[in-house]
């Protein structure tokens, strides 16, 4: 299917958030039916629950902090796998089954299709993070209660875990997965195979996690070319280290609200740019 010409009457149909929402709902419904979602969710839940029984391997870290690290580690790893794989599968299944061709033959903008897909995948990541954050908070609350009865002297001031920080950490994980979904969708908008999208999505994930190291190394090296390259990488790819605002379980270490807001703006700015480029790329793609 070639891109529509400016004279096509379908193009004169105004953009509709309602149609975008319907595409997002269908995307979320299709994603929830996938075995991959159920499998990764089961693994994540098992790891969060199982962390209580292999806490002896925490190498001296406080037990509650170890449980939280296991939970958010599972959320980050399996959430990234779910986001990249679901994005690739949902987009290419629409193309290979010709349902995208049928849908776009109706008065539906390609921008509505792309933005609907992103909204559905972001909602999927949100459900995933919400379930795991809720389960992790329940495990921490239960174990903290046990420790308070066993070691009352260590909890003279009451509970030590800030569940607001746990919720903030879950929110940061969701923002990070939303950015990853937008970049994966950008790749899927022009890629020819699902495998290429998945591999590139994980490659982007690694770059986003490690780009600050390359930037620091080139800055210390002093070479002007290295600084230019590092600056270009930092501008193109988001730095996922900025989402680590809630490493501590102590309410005293909570970041100020304006810092949380700045991180949110940072994330959605990258989402907006990536989705905009995905719409532009998909509009020029033959289906």
Image (spheres, grey):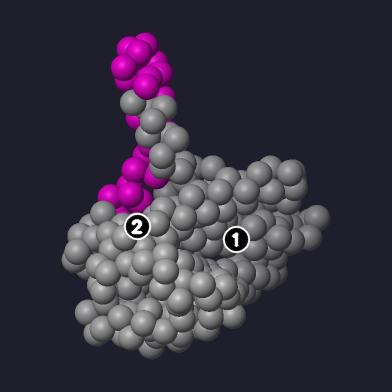
Q: Is residue 211 magenta?
A: yes
Pinpoint residue 253: horizontal percent, then vertical percent: 70, 44
Which label is found at residue 29?
none
- The quadrant of the rendering that contains the C terminus is bottom left
Earlier residue among tags 1 and 2 = 1
| Range drawn in magenta | 201-228
In the image, taking residue 278 as reference, residue 188 lies left or right, namely left
The secondary element bearing badge 2 is classed as: helix
* Label 1 packing within 10 angstroms: few (<14), some (14-19), many (20+): some
| Image: 232 above or below 161 | above
Can residue 91 be found in the magenta stretch?
A: no
Residue at the spot x=45%, y=76% of the render? 9
Decide if residue 53 is on the left or right side of residue 169. Answer: left
Q: Is residue 187 left or right of residue 262?
A: left
The residue carrying mark 1 is 171
- Residue 21 seen: no
Tell me the chief SS of the magenta region. Answer: helix
Q: Quadrant of residue 198?
A: bottom left
Q: Dot 1: what SS? A: helix
Residue 195 falls in image quadrant: bottom left
Q: Residue at the spot x=41%, y=39% of the render?
A: 236
Q: Gap between marks 1 and 2, in whole Å? A: 30 Å
Q: Residue at x 26, y 83 (%)?
A: 98
Depth check, front residue: 226 or 107: 107
Q: Which residue is mark 2?
A: 281
Disc nearest the viewer among 1 and 2 = 2
269 up-or-down from 101: above or below = above
Residue 131 in which image quadrant: bottom right
Residue 234 appears in the rendering: yes
The tally of labels here is 2
């Amino acid at each position: 299917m070639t891109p529509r010409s400016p004279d096509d009457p379908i193009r004169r149909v105004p953009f509709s958030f309602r149609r975008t929402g319907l595409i997002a709902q269908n995307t979320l419904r299709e994603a929830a039916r996938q075995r991959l979602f159920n499998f990764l969710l089961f693994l994540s839940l098992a790891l969060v629950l199982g962390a209580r029984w292999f806490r002896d391997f925490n190498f001296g870290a406080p037990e509650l902090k170890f449980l939280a690290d296991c939970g958010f580690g599972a959320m980050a790893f399996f959430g990234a796998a779910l986001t990249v794989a679901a994005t690739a599968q949902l987009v290419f299944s629409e193309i290979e089954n010709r349902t995208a061709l049928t849908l776009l033959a109706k008065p539906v903008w390609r921008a509505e299709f792309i933005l609907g897909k992103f909204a559905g995948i972001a909602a999927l990541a949100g459900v995933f993070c919400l379930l795991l954050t809720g389960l992790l908070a329940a495990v921490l609350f239960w174990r903290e209660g046990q420790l308070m009865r066993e070691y009352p002297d260590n909890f003279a001031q009451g509970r030590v875990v800030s569940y607001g920080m746990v919720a903030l950490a879950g929110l940061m994980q969701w923002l990070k997965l939303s950015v990853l979904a937008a970049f994966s969708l950008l790749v899927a908008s022009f890629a020819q195979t699902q495998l290429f999208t998945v591999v590139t999505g994980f490659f982007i994930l690694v770059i986003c996690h490690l780009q600050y190291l390359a930037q620091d190394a080139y800055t210390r090296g002093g070479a002007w070319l290295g600084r230019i390259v590092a600056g270009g990488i930092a501008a193109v790819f988001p730095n996922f280290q900025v989402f680590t605002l809630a490493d501590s379980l102590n309410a005293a270490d909570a970041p100020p609200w304006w810092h949380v807001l700045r991180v949110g703006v940072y994330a959605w700015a990258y989402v907006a740019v990536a989705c905009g480029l995905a719409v532009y790329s998909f509009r020029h793609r033959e289906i």
